[in-house]
Amino acid sequence: MKFLMTCLFALFYLSLSFSFITEAKTLQIMSYNVENLFDAKHDKDKKDWTFLPKDYPGKKEICLKEKNKHHRKECLESDWTEAKVDLKISQIHDVVTSGRELPEFLALVEVENPEVVARLAKKLGYENIEMSDSPDERGVDVALLYKGLKEIKKISRHEHIVPVDYPTRNILEVEFLINEKYPLTLFVNHWPSLANPDSWRVKAAEVLSKRSQDILMKNPAMAIVAMGDFNTIDDNDPHPFKTVLYKDNLFEDVENLFIQDKKIEDKTKSLKPAGTYYFAPKDQWNSLDHFFVNKVLSDGKDLDVTIKSFEIFSPPNITHALKKKTHNDEGKNIKIVLAPKRFEPRGETKESIGFSDHFPILVKLDYPDFSQKVTSNALAPKKRKK
């Protein structure tokens, strides 16, 4: 018995020398509508004439045919050169890298082609690019840049056509395996604009919803993030989020989770901008950009969204102070709105060319990383007393 007790004590003592440490690792995702990242070359069969040099053959004739007065003027006056492309890329770089390390994933909205996206990726330091090839007449697409880390393994990519009456942007889908264990699918969206019927955005929502359900039927453990510019406001009817994405609790909006989280102080919530896009004619803030996550990412297990990390990024240098007249019982007043400093293709300097008419959004995903560490207390020789 004495021998048995001695062995048990020795085993217990040795077990104390082994500590199993769980460290939380983080992936940061940014989604950014960069507003017209075009190169200075004409893409065949695309209406990219505004984003060409002023003396480009045939540009003036095409611009004069533009029916919209504002667009016609912008097309005729713009002189989109390689120098301006570099300036635009520099502006995006400044936003993405401002005060932080490069996000592991960067979803881009309103980009023209793989060549100009590759230039941006090189400037930022991303090794990998996935991009859609949409039928959009202007040549606008979406892209996903991601770091070349051993923890991030790409499994597959697909894109999905949105079946509406006018060619629009495809939905980009990329599947990953995180840390050799956690499946993750990212969707990048740029839904039909608000100038189009609400039913068109419902169609986009149905494409995203059906594909997500198909994925979850095959792998219920799949974490899904759908992000991008959804071009949806509260008074859309039918509403694509309420009638499709929220149905059967398929998706949750991370911004809503942030607002509803009682653990997050009201002061922190009050610092969040009222939206990602400001519509000046109606003095209206809209949250056009979203992160939608499925239940796998909000169950507190494995790969999980960190609600408190949600951010609408709006530092002073990418905002523009707009003066707006207001009316109340005391008469007229002037209020200042710090709106996104929108992109101006006719600008010549960093100050005049602006950034984008959208603020970017960010969120973090955390996942456990299990490692075994041998503590040296029991195995290392004790130091002699001096």
Image (spheres, helix red, strand yellow):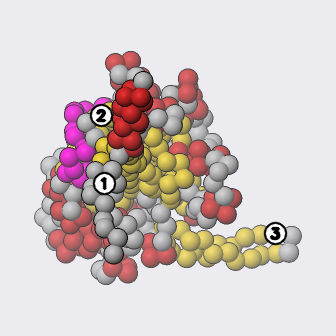
User: Looking at numbered disc 1 in the image, what kind of residue is underneath it?
Assistant: Ser
Q: Residue 148 colored magenta?
A: yes
Mark whose residue sits in front, 1 or 2 = 1
Give percent across and percent down for residue 138.
28, 50
**Mark 1 vs mark 2: which is more N-terminal?**
2
Q: Horizontally, is 359 left or right of 65 in the view?
A: right
Give the residue pinned by disc 3. Answer: 328
Query: Residue at 40% across / 64% down in the picture?
Result: 356
User: Looking at numbered disc 3 in the image, what kind of residue is underneath it?
Assistant: Asn
Name the quarter where the C terminus is drawn. Answer: bottom left
Name the quarter where the N terminus is drawn. Answer: top left
Give the distance between the C-alpha atoms of the residues marked 1 and 2, in whole angstroms.
Answer: 30 Å
Q: How many marks?
A: 3
**Mark 1 vs mark 3: which is more N-terminal?**
3
Give the distance between the C-alpha atoms of the residues marked 3 and 2, in whole angstroms.
Answer: 58 Å
For the residue pair 204 and 64, the one nearer the viewer reads as 204
Other residues around mark 3 within 10 Å, as few (<14) / some (14–19) / many (≥20): few
Mark whose residue sits in front, 3 or 2 = 2
Q: Residue 317 colored magenta?
A: no
Vertical arrangement, residue 219 with respect to residue 148, above or below: above
Please say whether residue 195 is visible from this viewpoint: no
Q: Judging from the image, what secondary structure is the residue with disc 3 in?
A: strand
Give the residue pinned by disc 1. Answer: 376
Vertical arrangement, residue 380 with respect to residue 344, above or below: above
Give the residue pinned by disc 2. Answer: 181
Start-end of magenta stretch? 142-160
For the residue pair 89 and 141, the one nearer the viewer reads as 89
Give percent across and percent down for residue 103.
33, 57
Q: Judging from the image, what secondary structure is the residue with disc 1 in?
A: loop
